Amino acid sequence: MKNYIKRTGFVSLVFLFGISQSFAMIERFENLIQEEYTISDAWWTDMVDMNGDGYTSSRKLNFDVDVDDDNSYDVYAEIYYKTLGDWCLDTTTSDFTITGSSSADAQWVVIEELPHDEYDFEIDVYKAEDPDNIQATRGPYDDGDLIYEKFETSDQDIPNGVEETMRQSRPHSFYLSQNYPNPFSTTTAIKLSGYQATKSDNLIARSLDSSVALKIYDLSGKLIQSFSLLTPRSSLLASIVWDGRDNNGEKVPAGIYFYRLQTADFTETRKLTILR
């Protein structure tokens, strides 16, 4: 009887050991199973075509990344473009979290300032923890919205009804830089440099009778905000920060605006974009 108990106890231990090993093997096998990613959709919004020629100077590329389980994963995307030849990297997104097939985690990036041409686009998705391996790709042969997309620069996309004076090269004249960041949602910086001889030695002042003015207009040509500058008899280097408000202190709507630097003998206009 004792031998029988010993034998059955031994068999039971072997049986339990076998079950535990089986569970361990199953767990290891499940860990080897790789989740699968897809880019389920890609689409364009907020297109800017000021002259109506079908070529946009700016627009948003939206895309939705899905995974085949209900867990959450941190990923990032790289956006490439090309006409003929090799792909060129346009944008690398920051890390973002996706869960299952939810569309609530869709992302977007702004594509802008590409020279006048038709472009193909490709979206590559990587796991944040594995930047060496592409997890999902969507390109021109997968999506008709990513092939032969028409773009041009803002200098080529001259707006109808609004005079936009391009940069004038002149010795000892002013230079107006592109605002940064652009597009922006809260504040943006506009840098100015150059030379202007005046009687005042105040660098920056909000005085409407100043000889140097930076003015911001909407698409209809309406004056939105004014900054006036007074310069010494030396070089000017200044940076104006605009908070997206008009002369009454009200936030202006999202959209395209123009800012113009004007002196007695110099005028330059550039374009900026506000996102809300």
Image: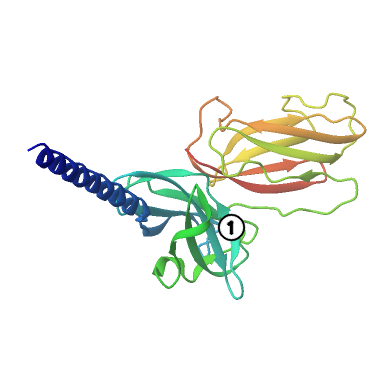
Q: Is residue 142 above or below residue 257?
A: below
Q: Amino acid at mark 1?
A: Asp
Residue lying farthest to the right in this orientation: 233
Residue lying farthest to the bottom in this orientation: 84
Percent position of residue 168, x then y: 79, 53
Residue shown at the point (75%, 41%) measured from the top left: 262
- Return the residue nearer the eye: 100 or 243: 100
Q: Is residue 153 above or below residue 174?
A: below
Left or right: residue 217 versus residue 29 is right
User: Which residue does the numbered mark 1 point to in the structure image?
Assistant: 90
**Image quadrant containing the N terminus:** top left
Res 141 → quadrant: bottom left
Residue shown at the point (49%, 64%) measured from the top left: 122
Residue shown at the point (59%, 30%) measured from the top left: 243
Res 260 → quadrant: top right
Q: Is residue 1 above or below residue 154?
A: above
Q: Is residue 101 visible?
A: no
Left or right: residue 232 versus residue 178 is right
Q: Is residue 233 visible?
A: yes
Percent position of residue 100, x then y: 30, 48
Residue shown at the point (39%, 70%) measured from the top left: 142
Mark 1 burial class by Cα count in 10 Å: few <14, some 14-19, many 20+: some
